[in-house]
Image (spheres, rainbow, N blue to C red):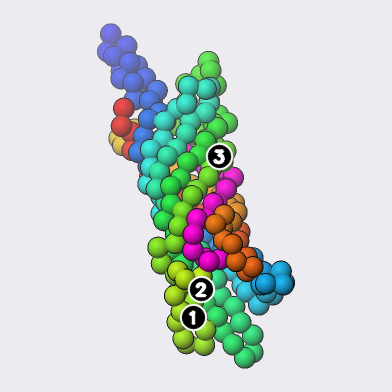
């Protein structure tokens, strides 16, 4: 009888481990600016920059086997440096957005409950706008909110993967990677700017069943 109770207790702990949850993620963005001037010439002097990212949201199974969805808020730094022997440049930006995505579990199956460890592939879309932006040129600072190629609405698509380990006392931990491409969908100027970002993330997930 005791063994049966222990089995039921263990079963109740493990079955909902990866179901409905709140999550918080943070990590590093490694961003490459792709800037084209009025003549559509690419600036070769711009180098990749680093910045942080933060995301908080809600995740829930979708009713389709192995698939779940996420909805949340994101804060991303898209930074870069550049220059030549005569001039130096630096861009520091922050974008606040709404995040939505889908995850597909590679280790779960219909006939077998999810285990403590899972591996997921994911795709997502993020819609954001600038809340902070400065450009430094040789020690002088300029506000990027007035620049159409930086301001407006930024649409970011991403694809990635994550490994997730359940901890029954609160939820789970995850570690992942995303490749992101961002374009400005409201920029009407002749200067164009897009971002390619490699993103490393660490997540904490809390069960809310």
Prevalent SS, magenta region: strand
Q: Is residue 2 left or right of residue 155?
A: left
Q: Nearer the viewer, residue 41 or 26?
A: 41
Image x and y of residue 18, in percent: 42, 30
Q: How many residues crowd around disc 1 within 10 Å: few (fewer than 14), some, or many (20 or more)? A: some
Q: Quadrant of the C terminus?
A: top left
Residue 130 point in image, percent of width and height:
44, 62
Q: Earlier in the sequence, mark 1 or mark 3?
A: 3
Q: Find disc 2 in the rendering and name its residue.
A: 91
Q: Horizontal placement of 3 versus 178: left or right?
A: left
Along the viewing direction, whichever of 37 and 17 lies nearer the viewer:
37
Q: Earlier in the sequence, mark 1 or mark 2?
A: 2
Q: Is residue 11 magenta?
A: no
The residue under label 1 is: 136
Residue at far front of view: 188
Q: CA distance from mark 1 to mark 2?
A: 6 Å
- For the N terminus, the image quarter is top left
Label 3: state its secondary structure. strand
């Amino acid at each position: 009888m005791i063994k049966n109770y222990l089995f039921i207790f263990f079963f109740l702990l493990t079955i909902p481990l990866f179901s409905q949850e709140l999550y918080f993620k943070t990590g590093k963005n490694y961003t490459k600016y792709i800037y084209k001037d009025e003549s559509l010439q690419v600036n070769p002097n711009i180098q990749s920059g680093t910045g942080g990212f933060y995301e908080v949201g809600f995740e829930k199974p979708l009713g389709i086997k192995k698939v779940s969805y996420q909805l949340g808020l994101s804060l991303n730094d898209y930074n870069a440096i550049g220059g030549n022997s005569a001039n130096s440049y630096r861009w520091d930006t922050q974008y606040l957005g709404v995040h939505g995505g889908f995850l597909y579990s590679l280790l779960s199956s219909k006939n077998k409950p999810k285990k403590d460890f899972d591996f997921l592939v994911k795709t997502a879309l993020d819609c954001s706008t600038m809340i902070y932006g400065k450009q430094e040129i040789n020690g002088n600072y300029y506000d990027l909110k007035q620049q159409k190629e930086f301001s407006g609405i930024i649409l970011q698509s991403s694809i990635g993967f994550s490994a997730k380990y359940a901890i029954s006392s609160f939820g789970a931990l995850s570690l992942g990677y995303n490749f992101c491409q961002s374009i400005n969908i409201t920029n009407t100027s002749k200067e164009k700017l897009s971002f390619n970002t490699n993103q490393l993330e660490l997540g904490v997930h809390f069960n809310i069943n």
